[in-house]
Image: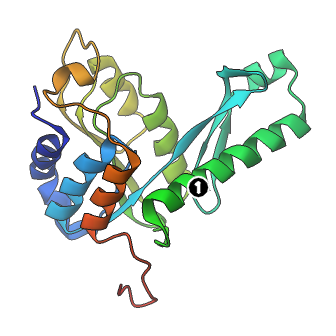
Amino acid sequence: MFANRKQAGRLLAERLEGLRDQDPLVIALPRGGLPVAAEIAKRLDADFDIVLVRKIGAPGRRELALGAIVDGDPPVVSWNEDVIAHLQVTRTEIEAIVAAERAEIERRRKTYFGGHRRISPAGRLVILVDDGIATGATARTALRALRQQGASRVILAVPLAPPDVVNALQREADEVYCLESPDPFGSVGAHYRDFRQLDDAEAIAIIDASGQSKPKDSDGKS
């Protein structure tokens, strides 16, 4: 049982201390992953960014995923080809949905980071962080996108996840740091005493406190 996300982040940071000298880039899955990742970035004196993942829902049936889009420069899109074929979704429909989701990703990034520069994962050791994993779908999509964007090594760091999900994600990441793998698992929130949902204002405050909210010049100075 974790007291809250900040405590979970501090415990993970202790496990990740050996990566400090490898110039890691810590990337959070918002909003829940932000307090955890912020503690890790502070302990490792690391660059800090977010990755936004959006489901691409079928026209009129948002619960059915045609694929997923991950923000980046350029964004990475993955597709569920079987679903697209079954629903006979047209290219025009797909292009419209992708455009809308890209706009939403950019809106959310600007909400959280304002004018903050996106930090490229290319050639970097990247530590992807969330507050816990239930199914692994979002983490899997993000890990694959980070590889496509050129990360030299990708590590997944989470306070807890089910044992079978940890095993599956070890095939996606170079390493997985998971503090607890309870079985039976239940829900992520069941393993925190304080698991209240963060709002946008709290997310922005965490990013501001990290020192990563202001654009930097070519010398890396705020």
Q: Is residue 93 visible?
A: yes
- Write down the residue under mark 1: 107
77 lies left or right of 156 = right
> Is the residue 55 above or below the residue 151 in the image?
above
Q: Which quadrant holds residue 78?
A: top right
Q: Residue at x 42, y 28 (%)?
A: 136
Q: Is residue 147 visible?
A: no
The amino acid type of the residue labelled 1 equals: Arg
Q: Residue at x 11, y 31 (%)?
A: 2
Q: Residue at x 44, y 58 (%)?
A: 112
Q: Position of residue 32 (x, y in %)?
A: 33, 40
For the residue pair 167 and 61, the one nearer the viewer reads as 61
63 lies left or right of 216 = right
Q: Position of residue 159 (x, y in %)?
A: 21, 35
For the residue pair 80 and 61, the one nearer the viewer reads as 61
Quadrant where the C terminus is found in the figure: bottom left
View extreme (top): residue: 184
